[in-house]
Each structure stands twice: as C-alpha cells, then as structure tokens.
C-alpha cells in the first residue's frame, strides 16, 4: 500500500508552488482599444477575424468580460483610466486631434 501511495505524494509535493511573498505584486497589462466590441476578436468567437496574438494572451492569462468606459470618446476614456478620476474631472475637453498640442493637465 505504501508503494502505491508514495508516487502520488511525491508528484503532488514536486508540483506545488511555494507561496508568493506578500510584497511581490502581480504584473498585469490592460489592452485599451477604441471601438472594439466584445465579439470582435477570435477568442470570443468571431467567425472571420483572426487575432492569434490577442487570443494567445487571453488563453494564457485572465479573461475579464465586463468593462465600463469612463467616457464615450477615446481621449476622455483614456484620461479617466490613467487618472482614476471621472471624465468631467480630468480636464480633458473631448477628443484630441493629431495636430493638437494639448493633453492631460500637468497636475494629473
């Protein structure tokens, strides 16, 4: 009986990970894309769009399926994400154009 249990115990012990140090913070990446719908990438089942790199990131990471954007336009939603503030409080007036010389206020 002991010989039949020993491989199971050794395998379980060898594959277990040591607990993570409480000061070791996890890394995460937020992919923030304009006008991307839930079903527009391969891993969510789009029938014709091929997104192998995004699919690989999704399958090897954590898939979160709910998102609430801070604003209806790109500049405002990015400012809200970067500052953690509601869009009207970020100081961003709307969409920044490609030739504009404005951005987030320096106090943000």
Image (cartoon, rainbow, N blue to C red):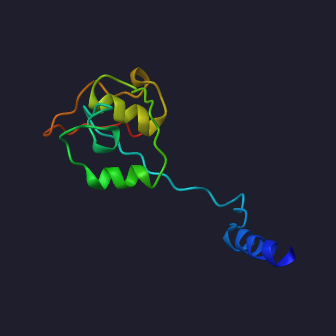
Above or below, 67 against 5 in this view is above
Q: Would residue 31 be seen by someone viewing this image from the given angle?
A: yes
On-image quarter of the N terminus: bottom right
Q: Left or right: 34 with respect to 31? A: left
Relative to 11, 86 lies left or right:
left
Q: Position of residue 2 (x, y in %)?
A: 86, 76
Between 50 and 54, which is closer to the camera in this rendering? 50
Please state the horizontal and vertical placement of residue 29, each as a whole percent of the image. Answer: 43, 51
Q: Residue furthest bottom?
A: 3
Image position of 28 (left or right of 73): right
Instruction: Check the image and report above or below for 5 versus 65.
Output: below
User: At which x and y percent is residue 43?
Assistant: 34, 44
Work out whether 82 lies above or below 13. Answer: above
Which quadrant holds the C terminus? Answer: top left
Nearest the viewer among 95 and 31 is: 31
Residue at left offset 45%, top offset 30%:
66
Instruction: Name the spot of residue 19 as percent of width and height, x first.
Output: 73, 62
Asked if residue 107 shows in the view, the reply is no
Question: At x 37% / y 34%, what residue is drawn?
Answer: 79
Residue at image location 70% in from the left, 73% down from the top: 11
**How many numbered circles does the render carry?**
0
Quarter of the view holding residue 81: top left
**Looking at this rendering, what residue extends furthest in the left direction?**
99
Question: Closer to the camera, 8 or 77?
Answer: 8
Choose top left, top right, bottom left or bottom right for residue 49: top left
Q: Residue furthest front?
A: 1
């Amino acid at each position: 009986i002991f010989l039949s249990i020993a491989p199971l115990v050794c395998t379980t012990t060898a594959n277990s990970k040591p607990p993570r140090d409480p000061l070791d913070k996890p890394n995460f990446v937020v992919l923030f894309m304009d006008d991307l719908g839930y079903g527009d990438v391969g891993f969510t089942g789009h029938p014709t769009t091929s997104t192998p790199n995004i699919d690989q990131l999704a399958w090897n990471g954590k898939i979160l399926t709910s998102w609430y954007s801070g604003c209806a336009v790109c500049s405002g939603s990015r400012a809200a994400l970067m500052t953690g503030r509601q869009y009207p409080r970020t100081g961003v007036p709307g969409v920044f154009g490609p030739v504009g010389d404005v951005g987030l206020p320096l106090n943000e």
